Structure formats: C-alpha cells, structure tokens
Amino acid sequence: MTAIQSTMKKILLPVGSLLFAIMASTCFHAAAAEPGSVAPDFTLPGMNNAIHLSDYKGKIVYLDFWASWCGPCKQSFPWMNTLQTRYANQGLKIIAVNLDVNSADGRRFLDAVPAMFDIAFDPKGTLGRSYAVKGMPSSLLIDRDGKVISQHIGFNPEARAQLEHAIQIAMEKK
C-alpha cells in the first residue's frame, strides 16, 4: 500500500462511519426493531448459503451488525465465538451481518478474525436500515418466538457480562 493510499484509508474510513451513523440515526429511526416487537425477517447471502432469520425460529438469536473497519468488532468476535460454543446446545445462534459495501473487505476481516457462527452479508445496508443500526457493532437479542428482547450499541469488556446475562435469562424461558 502506498503512502497516499494509507493516508486516504485513514481519512475515508472515519468519514464513512460518521456518515453511516448520521444516516442511520436520522433516516431510519422509525423502522427500528423495538424490544417487544417481532424482528423483521430477512434473507441475506451467507458465507456458503443464504441466511434466513425465519429458519432460526425456536432459537435464541444474537444478531450482530459489524464492519471490517470497526475496532470493537475485532474484540467482539472472539467473545461471540466463546458464546456460540458455550450455549449452542441450549439453543443460542449467533448471526453476524457484515455491512461493508464491498463484501471482500468483510471476508478479509474474517481471515484475520475467524467466526464460529453464521455470517451474512448486507452490502447495500438494507437490513441495517431496517433494524435502524446506529453504530458499530450493534446487536439485538431475539427470543425463540422471534421477538426482540433487547438492543445494544458498541462493545466493551464491561458490556460482556450484561449481554451474557441477558442471553442466559432468554435461554431459561421456554
């Protein structure tokens, strides 16, 4: 990578994320999947096969929105791998939706930070708008009946325990 390309990347990535955050918070707020509402169904291309949210009915779904340029996303993926391994037998399914315009950027991210859960690609941002994503990463916890339990924006070590506790409570409900 040339010095000019490196400089442009440093400038454009933060600008792009700021524009995405502004668009999400102003244009699409009304479409948000609020706690208690049914999560909007979707079909997106995945790593190998299409991902249909409706196929996960009866499971607890942790739906995560991420992008390759997101630093906290790099921290959240190992944690989500641990959750998927720990709670898969109790019905947890993690779906991580990549919002990069170029899906190849998301695939390069996954080469460096592998995922042991389902990955979907939304390069047009349609699902991100439908769920009113306001920042990266953003996540929703969806119950076995397809209703949104909670939403969370960002990722940090302090949030891990709270998010895992919410998952445990959701799994206890039949």
Image (spheres, rainbow, N blue to C red):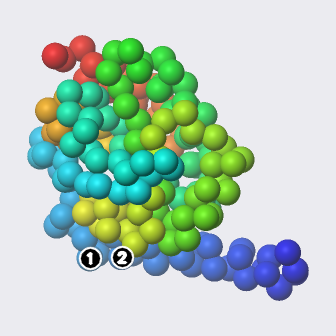
Q: Secondary structure at mark 2?
A: helix
Tag of residue 84: none
Residue that protrudes farthest toward the front in the picture: 49
**CA–CA distance between discs 2 and 1?**
5 Å
Q: Residue at x 57, y 78 (%)?
A: 15
* Residue 14 x/y as whole percent: 60, 72
Amino acid type indicated by mark 2: Met
Q: Count neighbours of disc 2 (C-alpha within 10 A) and say few if under 14, some if 14 to 19, many if 20 or more.
A: some
* Residue 140 x/y as whole percent: 32, 43
Q: Is residue 132 visible?
A: no
In the rendered view of the protein, which quadrant contains the C terminus? top left
Amino acid type indicated by mark 1: Cys
Vertical placement of residue 78 versus 19, above or below: above
What residue sits right under mark 1 in the picture? 27
Q: Residue at x 83, y 85 (%)?
A: 4
Contact, mark 2 vs mark 1 (Cβ under 8 Å): yes
In the rendered view of the protein, which quadrant contains the N terminus? bottom right
Q: Is residue 112 visible?
A: yes
Q: Count neighbours of disc 1 (C-alpha within 10 A) and say few if under 14, some if 14 to 19, many if 20 or more.
A: few
* Residue 162 x/y as whole percent: 40, 28
Q: Nearer the viewer, residue 49 or 119?
A: 49
Left/right placement of residue 152 relative to residue 158 reads left
Q: Residue at x 41, y 63 (%)?
A: 122
Vertical placement of residue 58 versus 112, above or below: above
Vertical placement of residue 169 versus 27, above or below: above
What residue sits right under mark 2 in the picture? 23
Q: Secondary structure at mark 1?
A: helix
